[in-house]
Image: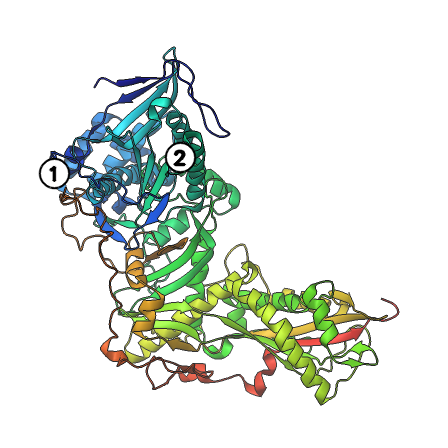
C-alpha cells in the first residue's frame, strides 16, 4: 500500500522541555493499515458513530465493571515438556520442512508425541537461525513458543474486543498502522506501529491488555506527536488491566507537555481503563505442568497463573532484572502481563481457598501488590514466597495445635519450641518474629525519639528514676475477618495483636534493678505501656515488611483451620495429614535449611546477658532494657461476615477471585494483583465451548460503547442462610463467629490453651540501672 505523506516543509514547532520538535523538511509517512471493522468484525460499516472512541474527555477514566473473554492457547498444554536429547532433536529436525511435517502429522493423529516433535523441530530451527538463540529450552518454550501464541491469540481477541466496545468502526478507523517520521534526506527518525489511527482526527490508539507502556514506544510517540501535521492528534490508550503507576506517571507527563506546547487545556493523552481478563483455553496432557504446592496428594500438584508467575520470577533481584529484560522483548501484546517482575511477591498472601472435595483438588487465590516500575525494579522471589504459603498451610494441618507456640526465656532452654515445629519454616518464622518483636518493642522506647521521650517522661518515678515492672509480652491473633461463600472461605483480614502484662522475673541480667514497683506503680506503668508502646509495635507487626512472613504464615493458619473444619464434617484428601505430626514433606527450605532453633536461642541469651540498647533518659543515670517472650498461634479465631457486608466492603471480589484461578487479574481501582490456581485436572477456559477472538458486532448507533451508561448493579440481597441478621459480636478467644447469632466453637484441639497460664509464651522486660563498669 502506498504511504500517505505529510510534510513539515519549513514549519517548525517551538520546543518545550521534554518535547521533541520537527526540523524543517521532516515528513510523516502513514503506512499500511486496514479498516478496523473489516479486520476485526468481518464487515464494513457505512459510517463512524459520533461517540466512537474513548467517551470521556479526560486524561484518565475507568469502567469499574470487569470483563472477560476466552482465547485458544493449545501451546500452554506443553509447558512442562522436557528439553530434547541429541537423538530426539535429530529425529525432530530443525528446518521449516521438518516443522511442517510434524504439524501435519499432529493435525492428522492428534497424538501429543507428534506435537512434541513439532515443538522440538521449532526449537532446532531457532537454535540454527536466531542471532542470539535461547539455549535454555524451558525458557525458550515459555518465553517464545508459548509466549508467541499468547501474543497472537490473546492480542487478537483483546483488540477485536476493544474495536467492538469502543465502536472503532466505519471509514474513519484504521487498525495496525505504521507511522514513520523521516528527515529531509529520507532517513527514519522515529517509527511506530499503532493499533488504531483515525483518518479524520489523526488520533492515535494503543491497545494495552496489561496496562503497561513500553519505553521505546513512548520515546517515538513524543517525536511523532511533535510534528506540526500531527498537532491535532491525540494519543489514546485502551487499557485492559489496572494501569501501572509508572505508566500513569509517564503518560501524564506527556499529556502535560503536549498541552503546554499546543496551548490547550484539553487532554492530549487519554487512558481508558476497563479490566478485561483473557482466559486461556487448552486441553491438559502428560506434558502439562504441575507445581508441588497446595495439593495434599504426594506426586500430584497444582497449576494456574499464580504458579506460573511465581516460578517465572527471578530468585534474586539481579536475576529478576535479567528475566524482565528478556521477557519484555516478547511482551508487546501483554502475553506476560507486566512481565515476570510485575508482581511484588514480598506482599503475597493467601486470600481464598475453595471447597476441599475429595479427589477434586483445592482452588486457591492469593493477592499481592504490583511493582510500580518493574522494568527498573522488578519483583522477585515468587517461588519462595508461594512455597512458604503452601508449606505453612500444611504445617498447620499436620501438627496438633498445642505445638503452635514459641518461647525465648533464659530460664527455659528446653522450651524454645517443639522439635517438629522447629523443622519447618513456619516454626522458624514465629521464633524469628519473637526476637524481632523484642528488638522493636524496646527500640520504640528510645528516648531520642518523640515517642520514647514522652514514654519515659510519663512513667511513674521512684527516687527520680522512671519505674516500671518486668513485662510478659506476646503476639496472638485477633479475630480474622472472613466470608464463607461460593464453597470456600475468603480471608479478608487477619490482624495480629500484641499483648503485654506485668510479670515477675527472677533471672538476673546486667546491672542493678532500678526499682521494685508497687501495685499502683505497676498499674500506672502498664497503662502507659499499653497506650503508647504497644500500639506502635502492633502497627509494625501488622504493616511493616520485617513481619510480612509472619502475616503470610498466619493467613495460611486461618485457611488450614477452615480445611480442618471441612474435613471434620466430611472426609477430604487432607484427612491423612491432619494431626499426623508428620511434616517431612514441608521441611526448612534453602537458604534456611540449616537453621537451628538453638543457634537463635544462644543469640538471644547473649543479648539478654549483655544488653542490646542502653538509653539515657532525663536523669544522671542510664537505663538498660531487656526483653524475653513468645508468639502463640494455638488459636485461630475468626468472624464470618454477612453476604451484604461482604458485597458492600468488597465489591466484585467473588468474581475477581474466581477469575484469578484462570488468569492474573487486578482488583478494582487498587494496584493489587489477584492470582490463583487449583489442583483438579480441569481444562482451563473450557466452560466456553467455542472460544473465538471475534466478538459480536457493535451497534453503530450513538450509545456509549463500553456500557458506561449502564447502572451499577444493586447490592445483592442477603443469602437465605444469613436470615437478614446483622453479624454477631466479635467472638472471644476460641470461638468462631459464623455470621449468625449462634457462635460455633473451633475444633477442641484449638480451643485448648497452653498449660500454666501460657508461661512458655512470655516476653519479659527488665529495666536496669547502668552499672559503674558500663
Q: Residues within 10 Å of mark 1 (few under 14, many from 20)?
A: few
Left or right of 309 in this view: 404 = right
**Going 26% across and 27% down the picture, which residue do you hit?**
177
Residue 247 locus on image (x, y percent): 42, 42
Is 414 located above or below residue 90 in the figure?
Answer: below
State how many labels appear: 2
Displayed quadrant of residue 145: top left
Q: Which of 465/510 is in front?
A: 465
Give the quadrant of residue 2.
Answer: top left
- The residue singled out by tag 1 in the image is 108
Residue at 60% from the left image edge and 80% from the top image edge: 760
Q: Residue at x 62, y 67 (%)?
A: 435
Instruction: Between residue 642 and residue 704, name the one nearer to us.
Output: 704
Quadrant of image for the N terminus = top left
Q: Position of residue 628 (x, y in %)?
A: 66, 74
Quick check: can you spot residue 651? yes
Kindly indicate the quadrant of the structure image that contains residue 37.
top left
- Say few, some or many: other residues with alpha carbon within 10 Å of mark 2 (under 14 / 14 to 19 / 20 or more): few
Please indicate, yes or no, whether residue 84 appears anywhere in the rendered image: no
For this rendering, which residue is in front, 698 or 572? 698
Eyeballing the image, is 652 above or below 501? above
Q: Secondary structure at mark 2?
A: loop
Indicate the quadrant containing the C terminus: top left, top right, bottom left or bottom right: bottom right
* Front position in the image: 207 or 674: 207
Q: Dot 2 corresponds to which residue?
A: 264
Q: Is residue 296 left or right of residue 493?
A: left
Q: Is residue 719 above or below residue 594?
A: below
Residue 69 coordinates in the image, percent (x, y): 22, 49
Q: Residue 495, percent across and down?
A: 48, 70
CA gap between label 1 and label 2 equals 61 Å
> Circle 1 — which element?
helix
Amino acid at each position: 500500500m502506498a504511504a500517505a505523506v505529510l510534510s513539515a516543509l519549513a514549519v517548525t514547532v517551538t520546543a518545550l522541555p521534554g518535547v521533541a520538535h520537527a526540523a524543517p523538511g521532516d515528513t510523516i509517512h502513514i503506512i499500511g493499515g486496514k479498516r478496523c471493522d473489516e479486520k476485526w468484525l468481518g464487515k464494513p460499516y457505512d459510517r463512524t458513530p459520533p461517540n466512537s472512541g474513548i467517551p470521556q474527555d479526560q486524561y484518565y477514566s475507568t469502567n469499574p465493571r470487569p470483563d472477560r473473554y476466552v482465547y485458544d492457547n493449545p501451546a500452554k498444554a506443553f509447558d512442562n515438556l522436557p528439553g530434547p536429547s541429541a537423538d530426539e532433536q535429530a529425529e525432530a529436525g530443525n528446518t521449516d520442512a521438518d516443522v511442517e511435517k510434524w504439524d501435519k502429522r499432529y493435525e492428522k493423529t492428534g497424538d501429543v508425541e507428534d506435537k512434541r516433535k513439532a515443538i522440538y523441530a521449532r526449537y532446532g530451527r531457532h537454535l540454527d537461525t536466531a542471532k542470539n538463540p535461547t539455549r535454555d529450552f524451558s525458557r525458550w518454550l515459555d518465553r517464545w513458543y508459548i509466549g508467541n501464541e499468547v501474543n497472537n491469540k490473546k492480542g487478537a481477541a483483546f483488540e477485536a474486543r476493544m474495536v467492538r466496545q469502543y465502536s472503532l468502526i466505519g471509514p474513519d478507523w484504521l487498525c495496525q498502522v505504521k507511522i514513520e517520521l523521516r528527515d529531509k534526506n529520507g532517513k527514519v527518525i522515529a517509527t511506530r506501529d499503532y493499533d488504531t489511527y483515525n483518518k479524520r482526527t489523526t488520533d492515535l490508539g494503543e491497545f494495552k491488555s496489561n496496562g503497561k507502556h513500553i519505553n521505546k514506544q513512548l520515546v517515538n510517540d513524543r517525536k511523532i506527536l511533535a510534528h506540526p501535521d500531527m498537532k491535532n492528534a491525540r494519543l489514546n490508550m485502551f487499557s485492559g488491566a489496572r494501569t501501572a503507576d509508572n505508566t500513569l506517571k509517564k503518560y501524564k507527563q506527556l499529556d502535560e507537555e503536549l498541552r503546554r506546547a499546543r496551548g490547550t487545556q484539553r487532554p492530549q493523552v487519554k487512558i481508558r481503563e476497563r479490566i478485561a481478563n483473557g482466559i486461556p483455553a487448552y486441553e491438559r496432557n502428560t506434558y502439562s505442568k504441575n507445581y508441588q504446592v497446595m495439593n495434599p496428594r504426594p506426586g500430584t500438584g497444582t497449576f494456574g497463573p499464580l504458579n506460573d508467575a511465581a516460578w517465572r520470577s527471578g530468585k534474586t533481584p539481579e536475576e529478576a532484572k535479567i528475566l524482565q529484560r528478556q521477557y519484555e522483548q516478547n511482551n508487546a501484546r501483554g502475553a506476560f502481563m507486566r512481565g515476570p517482575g510485575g508482581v511484588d511477591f514480598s506482599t503475597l498472601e493467601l486470600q481464598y481457598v475453595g471447597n476441599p472435595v475429595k479427589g477434586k483438588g483445592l482452588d486457591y487465590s492469593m493477592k499481592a501488590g504490583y511493582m510500580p516500575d518493574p522494568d527498573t525494579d522488578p519483583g522477585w522471589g515468587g517461588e519462595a514466597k508461594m512455597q512458604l504459603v503452601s508449606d505453612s498451610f500444611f504445617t498447620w494441618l499436620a501438627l496438633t495445635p498445642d505445638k503452635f507456640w514459641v518461647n525465648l526465656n533464659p530460664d527455659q532452654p528446653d522450651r524454645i519450641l517443639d522439635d517438629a515445629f522447629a523443622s519447618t519454616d513456619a516454626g522458624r518464622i514465629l521464633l524469628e518474629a519473637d526476637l524481632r518483636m523484642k528488638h522493636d518493642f524496646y527500640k520504640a522506647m528510645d528516648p531520642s525519639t518523640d515517642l520514647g521521650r514522652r514514654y519515659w517522661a510519663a512513667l511513674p518515678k521512684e527516687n527520680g528514676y522512671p519505674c516500671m515492672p518486668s513485662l510478659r509480652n506476646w503476639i496472638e491473633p485477633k479475630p480474622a475477618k472472613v466470608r464463607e461463600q461460593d464453597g470456600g472461605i475468603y480471608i479478608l483480614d487477619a490482624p495480629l495483636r500484641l499483648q503485654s502484662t506485668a510479670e515477675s522475673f527472677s533471672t538476673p541480667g546486667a546491672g542493678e534493678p532500678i526499682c521494685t514497683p508497687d501495685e499502683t506503680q505497676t498499674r500506672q506503668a502498664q497503662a502507659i505501656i499499653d497506650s503508647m508502646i504497644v500500639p506502635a509495635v502492633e502497627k509494625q507487626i501488622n504493616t511493616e515488611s520485617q513481619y510480612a512472613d509472619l502475616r503470610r504464615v498466619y493467613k495460611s493458619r486461618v485457611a488450614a483451620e477452615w480445611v480442618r473444619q471441612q474435613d471434620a464434617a466430611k472426609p477430604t484428601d487432607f484427612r491423612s495429614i491432619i494431626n499426623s505430626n508428620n511434616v517431612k514433606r514441608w521441611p526448612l527450605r534453602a537458604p534456611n535449611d540449616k537453621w537451628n532453633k538453638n543457634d537463635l536461642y544462644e543469640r538471644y541469651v547473649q543479648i539478654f546477658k549483655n544488653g542490646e540498647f542502653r538509653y539515657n533518659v532525663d536523669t544522671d543515670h542510664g537505663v538498660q532494657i531487656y526483653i524475653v517472650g513468645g508468639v502463640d498461634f494455638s488459636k485461630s479465631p475468626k468472624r464470618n461476615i454477612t453476604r451484604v457486608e461482604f458485597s458492600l466492603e468488597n465489591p466484585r471480589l467473588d468474581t475477581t477471585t474466581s477469575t484469578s484461578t484462570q488468569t492474573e487479574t487486578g482488583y478494582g481501582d487498587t494496584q493489587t494483583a489477584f492470582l490463583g490456581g487449583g489442583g483438579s485436572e480441569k481444562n482451563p477456559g473450557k466452560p466456553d465451548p467455542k472460544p473465538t477472538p471475534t466478538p459480536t458486532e457493535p451497534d453503530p448507533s450513538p450509545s456509549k460503547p463500553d456500557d458506561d451508561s449502564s447502572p451499577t448493579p444493586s447490592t445483592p440481597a442477603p443469602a437465605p442462610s444469613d436470615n437478614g441478621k446483622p453479624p454477631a459480636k466479635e467472638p472471644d478467644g476460641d470461638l468462631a463467629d459464623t455470621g449468625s447469632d449462634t457462635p460455633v466453637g473451633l475444633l477442641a484441639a484449638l480451643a485448648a490453651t497452653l498449660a500454666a497460664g501460657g508461661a512458655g509464651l512470655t516476653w519479659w522486660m527488665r529495666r536496669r540501672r547502668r552499672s559503674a563498669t558500663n
